Image (cartoon, rainbow, N blue to C red):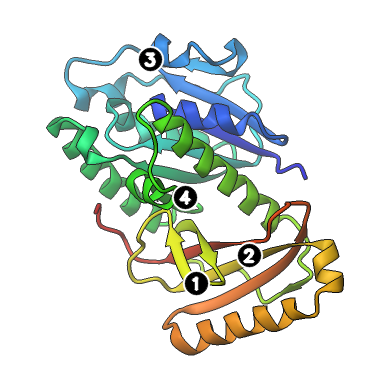
Amino acid sequence: MKTNKTIIGLGNSGTEIANVFSTYEGYNHLCLDYDQVTLSGTKKENIITLPVMTKVIEDYEETIPDNLFKNKILDKDILLVIGGGGKISVSSLRIIEQLKEKGNVSLLYILPDPTFLAQTNIILNKVTFGVLQEYVRSGNLERMWIVSNPDIEQILGGLPVIGYNEGINKAIVSSFHTYYNFIESKPVMSTLSPLPTAVRFSTLGMFDETSNDEKSFFSLDKISDVEYYFAFSEEKLRADKGVLNSIKRTIQDKNSTSKNRCAYGVFATSHKQDFVLLAKHTSLIQLNK
């Protein structure tokens, strides 16, 4: 299914993830950076080169030119991807203001592992994370998705040194691609409905029906809404009479034990394995853990 979404990658992390999105059908992508090494793996037509970083990081935002996206084709739905801690993240608000003129903008913020950051980058990540959340809460963006590299690494059961970023990025992109397909598909059964307007902070994760274990890409505080996306083969949904009872037991258990609102959708897919994707949401600003 075509998703018709533009992915904007800002900086090294954003560029890597935008390029992974481009391997799936339905995504237009652009990569923004001042570092030619970062952009070297991206096709020329998908690159927007930014000014060289200033000596004083705080001054960099003022160097971002107007009309960055002139003559660029953007879809109505735009996802801006930012990796926390990068110097280039200080330009994000200036870039967001220009993107808002083009379409509906959501943000994917990637919290890095602080073990791999210098003290300056740790502080920069903390400040940027807080500023962007305030901006989102005021209604300037559709949604802010938050994922944490350490949390994803733990879900994956660890990663090798060589291939660490690739493993993280693949997990992020495949999960979001699956989510986008679900929200644009017709479910077999569903209680899903639009979220309240103020609920703008979200993360994705996986749910194991057997162990009743939920693993999130970020440990979201004060969750108000959880959505469960059950994926089964069409053959199983037609022939296996136990599937419905299993889903009902899960939902009844969640509704009786959770303090937040729960909704679910059941989808027929072509995936070889059954799985449950979850999306968690809140209206409250999150701490950088």
Q: CA distance from mark 2 to mark 4?
A: 24 Å
Q: Which residue is mark 3?
A: 34
Q: Residue at x 34, y 52 (%)?
A: 133
Residue depth check, mark 1 versus mark 3: number of the one nearer the observer: 1
- Mark toward the start of the polypeptide (3 vs 2): 3
- The picture quadrant where one finds residue 37 is top left
Q: Residue 141, which numbered label?
A: 4
Q: Classify residue 24 as left or right of residue 146.
A: right
Q: Amino acid at mark 1?
A: Ser
Q: Is residue 238 visible?
A: yes
Crowdedness of circle 1 by 10 Å Cα count: few (<14), some, many (20+)?
few
Provide residue 22's location: percent of width, then percent of height: 63, 29
Q: Looking at the image, which is closer to me, 255 or 246?
A: 246
Provide residue 280's location: percent of width, then percent of height: 47, 64
Furthest residue toward bottom: 256
Q: CA distance from mark 4 to mark 3?
A: 25 Å
Label 1 SS: loop
Q: CA distance from mark 2 to mark 1?
A: 17 Å
- Mark toward the start of the polypeptide (4 vs 3): 3
Q: Looking at the image, which is closer to me, 220 or 129?
A: 220
Q: Which residue is mark 2?
A: 229
Q: Amino acid at mark 3?
A: Tyr
Q: CA distance from mark 4 to mark 1?
A: 36 Å
